[in-house]
Amino acid sequence: MTQEVQVAAHVASPVLHGGTRWRRLPISLWIGGLIVVAHLLVAILGPFLAPYAPGQMGAGIPLSGASWAHPFGLDQLGRDVFSRVLHGAWLVLVLSLSGTILGFLLGGIIGLISGYLGGRFDLVVMRIFEALISIPVLFSALLIIALVGAKASGTLVLIVIVIGFVYAPRVGRIARGAALEISALQYVLAAKLRGDSAWRIALREILPNATGTLLVEFATRAAYAPVLVASLGFLGFGIRPPTPEWGLIISENRDLIFISPATIIGPGFMLASLVIGINLLTEGISRILGRTVTQRN
Amino acid sequence: MPLLRFIATRISISLVTMLIVAVVIYFATAILPGDVASRLLGRSPDPTALAILQKRLGLDVPLVFRFLKWLGHVLIGDPGVSLISGQPVAEIVGRTLWNSSLLALLALLIYLPIAVIPAAIQAIYADRKTDHAISGAALGIMSLPDFLLGTFLLLAFAAWWPIFPPRSTIDETSGALDVLRALVLPAVTIALVMGTYATRYLRENLIEVLNSDYVRMARLNGIRESTVLWRHAFPNALVPTLNVTSLSLTYLFGGVVVVEKVFAFPGFGNLLVSSLMQLDVPVIQATVLVAAAIYVAGNLVADLLTVMVNPRLRYQ
Amino acid sequence: MGEAGAILKVDDLTVSYGYPGARVAALAGVSFEVAAGEVLGLVGESGSGKTTAALHILGHRPRGATLDKGSVLLRGRDVLKLSQAQVRALRGREVSYVPQNPGGSLNPARRIGRLIVELLEQHGVVKTRQEAWARAEELLAQVRLPDPRGLLQRYPHQISGGQQQRVVIAMAIAARPSLIVLDEPTTGLDVSTQKEILQLLREIRDTQNVAMVYVTHDLHVLREIATHVAVMYAGRTVEIGDIDQVFDAPRHPYTRGLIASVPDIRQSNALPRGLPGTLKRSELPAGCAFAPRCEFAKPSCWRNRQSLETVAGSHMVACECWTALARGAKAHWLHGRTAAETGSAAESVLELRDLCVDYETTSILGFARSARRRVVHHVNMTLRPGEIFALVGESGSGKSTIAKAILGLTAPSSGEIVFDGEALAGDVRHRTDLQRRRISLVFQNPDASLNPHRTAGQILGDALRSFEKVSASEAAERALAALQDVQLPDSYISRYPDQMSGGERQRVAIARALIVRPEVLICDEVLTALDVSVQAGILQLLLRLRTERRLSILFIAHDLAVVRSLADRAGVLYSGQMMAVGEKEALFDAPLHPYSFHLLRALPGAALVEPAVPPKAPAGAAASDGPRKGCPFFSRCLVARPGVCDVADPPARRIEGAVLYCHAEPETLRTAFKFVPEDEPAPDRMIG
């Protein structure tokens, strides 16, 4: 007879209660948090701090490079790039966050339900998810924008919808995996045996235990969203000019790279620092929760 | 026999996935705003000309039949002709696919050491200063959007220290050395992006392997450390390497759109962007389908290799 | 011990974990010696430091461990002072290691032959490659593995767990070391496999003149192999001596409690006593570490550090009170049962009639395949009101599947589950609330069965509210009462599962099952994940609940000793088929069914003589695939008759108090399987 000793299946996230575990927070969480808070402040205060209006031409001599008056230099139209970056800061944050949330609402709900229910429904959902995931992120995004056509293209809502649609199947796959794993655990079985409704089981037994996985996934996706927004802008499929969206600014100043590199390095630095901040935050969260960050694709 | 059955199931799943992709792409592009025919003929087309063109394009047939016909053609390798240039789509896609494959190959060659060596160092010195330093550097590179990374490389190695061309345009006339020079910067960009992601994943897996009972057993049996690393740990870490590389394949052919644009490289991503701008439907369909097929095939190959490499799975 | 020929001499080994300022002692001055031909058993519960001690003997320091002082002298050389290269040369050559988990310890990507050859070559045992392969084959033959040559080319996962452990043992003796460290080498194996492995280890002990350190939590196993024993508690050696001295006349209260915690295999109705509380390393007193759990502790025990004092000869104990304490282990509680407690044969609360369960294999694409595997085959049994019915079997015997079927998680393919006169629906979703409430389940692993995000109070309240509309205050009241029922303090109502010990969690799980006032409690291997001293408390709890509430308990277990101490009646399953069912005395006091005999004989410390029929070579596990024909035990049965037993299902044969499913007549079985009466000492006790 085998001693059927099972190792505790801690798929579930460790519980943080009593405050005991918050004391030794990882350093990455602090740094990441600080960077993200700084970006939030820039987003809120940026328009007031900016020395020039975003579209104001002739703020200085065009293409004159970086100086104390124009830290990020001036673009071809003589607009102050630093001011444009400050004015556009809220855009990238709002677009990324709303897009990611939309993706989570769509993908998370479908994924959790699919994983919990299992069976044919799960099978069909998973095949569709797989098919959608197999189309590269940027391809899907560009395709959706092209499909919507000229009327809606370049609007903020469209970008949010694009991020949501691209993320949904990817988040859905993760959520489904988490639900599937948790559903197999004995406390879910106990609830099923008592005859609890699927809704109650999902809310009480599965969701709280999937939050760890979902949180890490959310942070990972949120870190990529600004890149996606900027990439679309860079390719000319994003927000329309003259909106001071960072990717668009970088794209507009691309030809200046050998003349006035500050016009690219400036917004580039802002974008990169935001992503680094969110990534550090993710790293910290996942370290607390004791899990590894998923691959983006 | 269970192995054969596994392969058969795995292939059939891939086919189902591809079928769904084909359906999604075809029907999505079919609803493209502004009937393609009317777009081609300009703002106020002559009704008879429009009808003739629609007939020529097969737009008068019900959608489902058009789809089946298209699918049949795709299956025999003929996804039609470009609406813009009139060239066969297969030819256009094939040319860029060749370019992209060259880029992908070079990127993969650079990527492997970038991914594996730091991960191995990190795993051996897990949770020490070296590990943290590499982790930090990887996180930094990873956080840099790829088009920025490319732009900065361009700035450094094409502007300040001009050893590589600023534009990676190549065609049939380019010499081998020119092609290679053109490929280096984009390939390094791609390899860095892929490599930093892979490193994190590999580090976790290597640490897991190094902490496994069998590695501990080998050490407690007095086996030399080099043997432990190469004979005991490495083969078991190969599987995760394969998996993460296969996931990167999709990035190599689909995600590098912006990198291609940065370097003006005539690759797969650029083809999609230009065909989307011109609404060249047959080209769009083929490009997306091929990109998806590469992803699906990559996953399939990785799964099969995993089974081949891992004797435990092989005999199950 | 203590002769000049000591191979291993561990002296004052002191090891701690953690950072300066926040140190936790793992080992606090552990000393012992082992000579060639001796086997020293290191015994203790989880957290006693026995594995840490064993790893230090191999010169292996676990991550985060700091050596504070002490030495490990292996043939006079201090292993802890050697360089990395010297330690490497020592390991596998002078001292080798047999781990608990052979499956995980053999590299899945490498062939068995390569692993052994590599070991032989790296330690310079052989000169040429051919010699290495020849020697590897010899070694596999030496550990009694069938077809050694073929085995060399196979991968570890292709052989059974017992065979894997034999391979590991072959590697351990490959370089003829003078010391072998074994860390729970039979934990996780079936009893019959365990018996064979122990036999092999005894042979090695007796023929190879090797010293062994044997780490285990299982006292019965120790008695089968060890010549000496060191009892460890919280990183300290509390008692040490010859195995007979320690086991027959234990002096330390912990040793006595530990021995009393183990169910007696030779006695029915003897309930183990257990120890109060659990080992909490963060709350150790300055004095005797065991004082918080000791019933004899005096105020001075909490203050004074205890050191080993000689009792007689090499027998030493670290307890200042030992002279004042009565000798010997505490007796087990004998519990009887009255007819009033258990129902009569006519009554039944739950009945399985001809139950069959098949598993269907489904492909990934979602099309059901015709491939079916039968896991439960025409099982009949009755659970009477107020009785404890034990379902016994090895892993894969289908006992858990039967529980799933009763609970409605797996639909039977045929047959009926009758509860209180009504046939139950196959799917739990089609059962009434009342039916669901009346059958409750306690899971094997309390770590996985409690939602980590909810407190004990919430967990109990959730269960209650599934069946009754209760106010918040009433729910809290009922939850408190349920906690009291399982002897947990009221404060636990606001604790999360990770703030409790394993035993406490299991109590909450039992409270959750009981709060809805069920009539039938299904306990699925509820003791497996717990330490022995904690197991005893759970057993007592179940017995009390049965008596107080007239609860009917279906107790699923693999441990025959526990079953004999607790159950009223039992059913023995093999490969999904009932082999014998009836009063436990009729089944186990004088086992007649060949399989029951086989199980009991394999138990370490069991008092049975060899059967009158010649023993068979150990066959592999029963084939579970393919069409079922005849008796599943046929290939391993000592009295099997080809042409009869492998053709038809065994018929039911009624004997006094039980039904046996066997082709052989009870008379034939009676002459084939002789047994020793309970009160005689076991003749085959293996004491060196």
Image (cartoon, coloured by chain):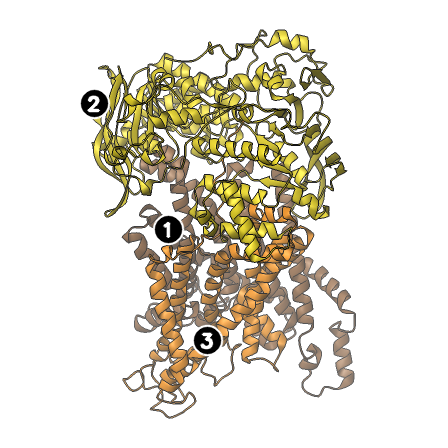
Chain colours: A orange, B brown, C yellow
Q: Measuring from the top left, give residue A62's x and y in whole percent.
A: 36, 89
Residue A92: mark: 3
Cα gap from disc 2 to disc 1, whole angstroms: 41 Å
The residue lying at 51 percent from left, 31 percent from top is C539
**Residue C672 position (above or below residue A104):** above
The residue lying at 54 percent from left, 79 percent from top is A156
In the image: residue B278, left or right of residue A32: right
Q: Which amino acid does label 3 sit on?
A: Val
The residue lying at 41 percent from left, 80 percent from top is A44
Residue C618: mark: none
Q: Where on the picture, by quarter, is residue C596?
A: top right
Disc number lying in front (2 or 3): 2
The residue lying at 71 percent from left, 23 percent from top is C629
- Callout 3: few (<14), some (14-19), or many (20+) C-alpha neighbours within 10 Å? many
Query: Are marks 2 and 1 in one subunit?
Result: no
* Residue identified by numbered label 2: C76
